[in-house]
Amino acid sequence: MSSNQIVIRKKNPATRCDICHMSDQFDSDTETCRRCCNVPIPINATYNPPGITPINEVKSFQQFASKFVAYSFILMVGALALTILSGMLKIIPLAIIFAVVSFLLGSAFIISLGIFALYMVGTLLASIIQSIYDSLRARS
Ligand SMILES: [Zn+2]
């Protein structure tokens, strides 16, 4: 038997409340506590009050956005290099195609970088406003 196996030898009914850890108001037959029976319990651990974005969602957006910006930049540089290469090899139609592609990728890069920058500035401003609001509320 490995050390991380657990053997349950005996199972006893609960004798005290899971919430307040007291037995004085706890009814072991119905497994309810008269003190805590009206305490609201979140349905799941990932419950978030309305208006608060889960931190994972924010993180995954930042990861996605930074990846998008990085890839569009790399692809733009690649298309630009291919434009120059086909220009040097005097393959003009190919050079025009790569020029258009690099222009589109460049626009995507600039626009996504702008949106990402605005988003970061917005998040920063929101946290500054939140901390000002909190300090004002703490004073009053
Ligand atoms: Zn209780």
Image: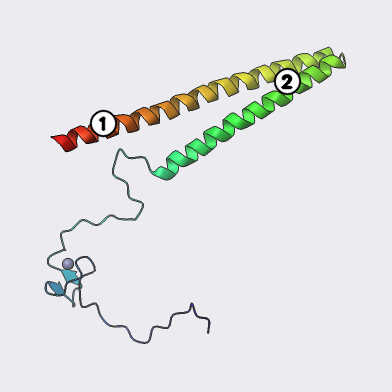
Disc 1, ligand 1: is the CB inside 8 Å?
Answer: no
Please state which of residues 18 and 128 is positioned toward the viewer in this rendering. 128
Mark 1 to mark 2 CA distance (whole Å) = 46 Å
For the point 83% across and 12% down, the residue is: 92
For the point 51% across and 22% down, the residue is: 114
The label number, if any, that marks residue 8 in the structure image = none
Crowd tier of the residue under label 1, counting other residues whose Cα lies within 10 Å: few below 14, some 14–19, many 20 or above = few
Task: Report x, y in % for residue 95.
Answer: 79, 16
Amino acid type at circle 1 is Ile
For the point 32% across and 30% down, the residue is: 128
Please state which of residues 38 and 81 is positioned toward the viewer in this rendering. 81
State how many labels appear: 2
Task: Report x, y in % for residue 26.
Answer: 15, 73
Crowd tier of the residue under label 2, counting other residues whose Cα lies within 10 Å: few below 14, some 14–19, many 20 or above = many
Q: Nearer the viewer, mark 1 or mark 2?
A: 1
Amino acid type at circle 2 is Leu
Please state which of residues 109 and 135 is positioned toward the viewer in this rendering. 135
**Residue corresponding to mark 2:** 80
Please state which of residues 30 and 2 is positioned toward the viewer in this rendering. 2
Q: On the image, which quarter does residue 29 sit in?
A: bottom left
Instruction: Find out whether the residues at labels 1 and 2 contact each other: C-beta distance under 8 Å.
Output: no
Q: Name the secondary structure under disc 2.
A: helix
Image quarter for ligand 1 equals bottom left
Q: Closer to the N terminus: mark 1 or mark 2?
A: 2
**Residue corresponding to mark 1:** 132
Q: On the image, which quarter does residue 130 sit in?
A: top left
Q: In the figure, 101 relative to 19: above or below? A: above
* Residue reaching furthest to the right: 89
Q: Name the secondary structure under disc 1.
A: helix
Task: Report x, y in % for residue 102.
Answer: 69, 20
In screen coordinates, is 99 left or right of 40?
right
Q: In the figure, 56 relative to 96: above or below? A: below
